[in-house]
Image (cartoon, helix red, strand yellow):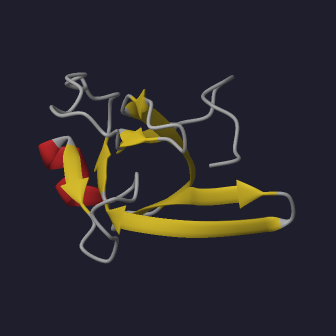
């Protein structure tokens, strides 16, 4: 994700970028990522999924469900995408690395 993190008075939704083994087989822990809210309507919250240079991709979620539950699963997203589940507040992450040796 190329966009900057939270700053100023902008509002954000939060997701989790899954942990993974990098190209050197070193475990990179999961981390919370933020998605800037671009617009709110009575039914939807629109957010910036991706912002790299001139390319922007906007996503949206059901506002009523998100505000009622504090989180929402986005069925149109793959489970590995950071916005496959979005939260109103930054979630807590379990930082337990996977078992096993990758060598």
> Along the line of sight, which residue is nearer the eye, 23 or 19?
23
Rendered residue at 86%/65% (across/down): 54
Where, by quadrant of the figure, is residue 25 drawn?
A: top left
Q: How far across and down, in percent of the image, does residue 68 sit?
A: 14, 47
Q: How far across and down, in percent of the image, does residue 94 sit?
A: 19, 24
Q: How far across and down, in percent of the image, does residue 73 sit?
A: 21, 60
Q: Is residue 70 left or right of residue 18?
A: left
Q: Is residue 8 left or right of residue 98?
A: right
Q: Is residue 68 left or right of residue 62?
A: left
Rendered residue at 24%/73% (across/down): 75
Location of residue 51 with respect to 34 vertically, above or below = below
Q: Quadrant of the C terminus?
A: top left
Rendered residue at 40%/51% (across/down): 82
Q: Residue furthest front?
A: 103
Q: How far across and down, in percent of the image, does residue 101 sit?
A: 25, 33
Where, by quadrant of the figure, is residue 4 drawn?
A: top right
């Amino acid at each position: 994700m190329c966009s900057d993190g939270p700053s100023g008075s902008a509002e954000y939704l939060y997701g989790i970028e899954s942990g993974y083994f990098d190209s050197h087989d070193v475990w990179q822990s999961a981390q919370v990522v933020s998605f800037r809210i671009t617009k709110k309507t009575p039914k939807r919250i629109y957010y910036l999924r991706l912002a790299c240079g001139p390319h922007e991709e906007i996503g949206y979620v059901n506002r009523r469900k998100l505000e009622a539950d504090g989180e929402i699963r986005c069925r149109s997203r793959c489970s590995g995408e950071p916005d496959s589940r979005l939260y109103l507040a930054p979630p807590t992450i379990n930082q337990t690395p996977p078992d096993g040796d990758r060598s």
